[in-house]
Image (spheres, rainbow, N blue to C red):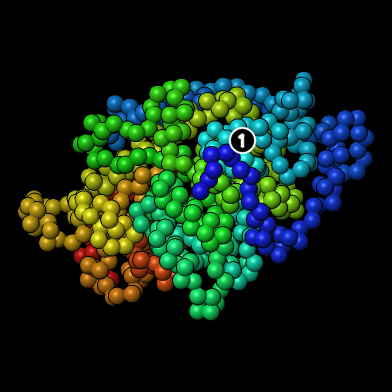
Amino acid sequence: MASEKQSKAIPLSHHLSEVAKARKPSPLKGLSKYFKQEGVLSLAGGLPSPAYFPLSGLSVDALVSDSFALAPTERSSSFSWLWKLLGSSSFKKERTTAISIPKYSATPDDINLAAALQYGAAVAQPQLQNFLRDFVMQVYQPAFEDFTVLIDTGNTDGWCRAFGTLCNPGQGVLMEEWTYPSALASMMPAGVDPVSVPMDGEGMKSDALEKLLSEWDEEARQMSRPHVMYIVPVGQNPCGTTMGATRKKQIYEICVKYDIIIVEDDPYYFMQLGTYEMKSQRSSVASPVSHRSGDEARFIASLEPSFLKYDYQGRVIRLDTFSKTIAPGARLGFFTCNPVFAERFERQGETSTQSPCGFGQSIVTKILTTWKYEGYIRWLQGLRTEYQQRRDFFVDCLADEFHLQATPAVAGIWEGCTMYRAFSKPSVLNTNEKLLSQSRALFSFIPPNSGMFVWLKLNLEDHPSFTPDDEGTLETKLWARLAENGVIFAPGWFFTTDDLASSEPSAGHFRISYSNAEYGDLKKAVNIFGRVIREFFDEQV
Ligand code: PMP
């Protein structure tokens, strides 16, 4: 176990792939340290003069950090969807702060376009680097001393660099049985295959992981035991699960035992929304999350910790992104990991993206340094509340459209959790519970406690045209029927690792996002879904 005193990362370079070992510094980039020497006359690089950058400064109207309320408001907790529609962000007058970035700054410490738009090393601008390091220390509190923070262009880039640096063709990566499709799409063409680990209501199961690794049979699998794990522990995409501290510690210790590197892809970390409570119960339930201004430490403490907090060996590569907290188009994110891996990621960055776009970096940096750490945390708190309200509103819409019955799940990924089974609303002639229990459940789900998605499991066994092991056909037919009626969900097959270890059929699911549509459209989509799925379950297709 971790000692009280922080230690440095253990040697882990045996995890590097052949490609990663072969990378050399890009010749000119390798000389960049000399460029920083005072008075040096550098005629080496093909740098355009900043005089030819066609702008003399940038002015931006940033929102103020307390733009969004800390707690759901009285009116919103009554959840009149009409009010939500009127109150949605596009109708609000935004409060802003004017910020400007000059081409040439008075002091070298100030962010300026002459430097930000110039070629440079594949690292962050110094002001952003300082901000991020401080942020990582305060929020994630890594358990090893020599962690390194390195900029990238978001978690898609982060994962692409991570598996390329760690995996050789023919190797496998441990993944949750349902996972983020782009993560699969980037590694599989490189000959790196998913190795599926069963999930439950907290995400990847630690006992299943231990079993899989302890019983690994190289010959039967035709693959060496995986040494890399890809995991989305918060707002799991697609299932919406959140992994608690105990499970994380168990998984970490298993990874120590079997010498596995954990890649923690965590875009939804600050969207930890708490448990959904039915509309009628909501106001009486105290939220575990701080809703007081100036209470950053309490807010951070209310969040499930990152794997970094338990990482006394430096075997976690954490991927953070600004896509969900600032904007996806900023194309900005960062690794936190041991210095050996960070150095290899930097080498890879030098020959691919180089440093992320200078316009985006300087604007995001200026916003963050204007808000300061406290302001950014305040912004994140406001976002958390916004997504909580969206989640609550969306599940309320389902509760209005269907009759939801809370039932303990006996199998599948929700085993042991209370899930909601959705029935057609009882008609006037069918109001008593007995008749209801004889009627069909159309789908089941667990309201997510983090992230942006509701994961629905369709109850296809009760469909008149159901054929065992052919859930895919019905899933696709219902998906197409919904699309024809103007509603598009993500079909479940997108997210399958398609491995025999799965505890559920690999079809018969939808992932629904409540993150972006206006409230009125969310309501409309649920009404259409209700009509279409009821008709669908009433007919042979
Ligand atoms: N990882 C996961 C799990 C995601 O859900 C997403 C966004 N859908 C990404 C990565 C992509 O992140 P980025 O925009 O930072 O590339």
Q: In the rendered view, does 69 fall on the left or right side of 530?
A: right
Q: In the rendered view, does 130 fall on the left or right side of 472?
A: right
| Picture residue at 25% right of the left edge, 68% below the top | 461
Q: Quadrant of residue 48?
A: top right
Nearer to us in this view, 200 or 449? 200
Q: Is residue 400 above or below residue 174?
A: above
Q: In the rendered view, does 116 fall on the left or right side of 385?
A: right
| Residue type indicated by callout 1 | Leu
Is ligand 1 closer than 8 angstroms to the Cβ of mark 1?
no
Can residue 43 be spotted in the picture? yes
Can residue 328 be spotted in the picture? no
Per the image, the residue denoted by label 1 is 132
| Picture residue at 44% right of the left edge, 53% below the top | 250
Nearer to us in this view, 36 or 225? 225
Nearer to us in this view, 510 or 268? 268
| Picture residue at 64% right of the left edge, 60% below the top | 15
Residue 129 image point, x, y percent: 67, 35
| Picture residue at 58% right of the left edge, 49% below the top | 313
Quarter occupied by the C terminus:
bottom left
Nearer to us in this view, 8 or 22? 8
Q: How many numbered discs sit on the rendered protein? A: 1
Q: Of all residues shown, which one is farthest toward the bottom? A: 219
Residue 240 image point, x, y percent: 39, 50
Q: Is residue 347 above or below residue 361?
A: below
Mark 1, Cα crowd under 10 Å, few <14 / some 14-19 / many 20+, is: many
Residue 366 image point, x, y percent: 64, 28
Residue 210 image point, x, y percent: 44, 63
Tag 1's secondary structure?
A: helix
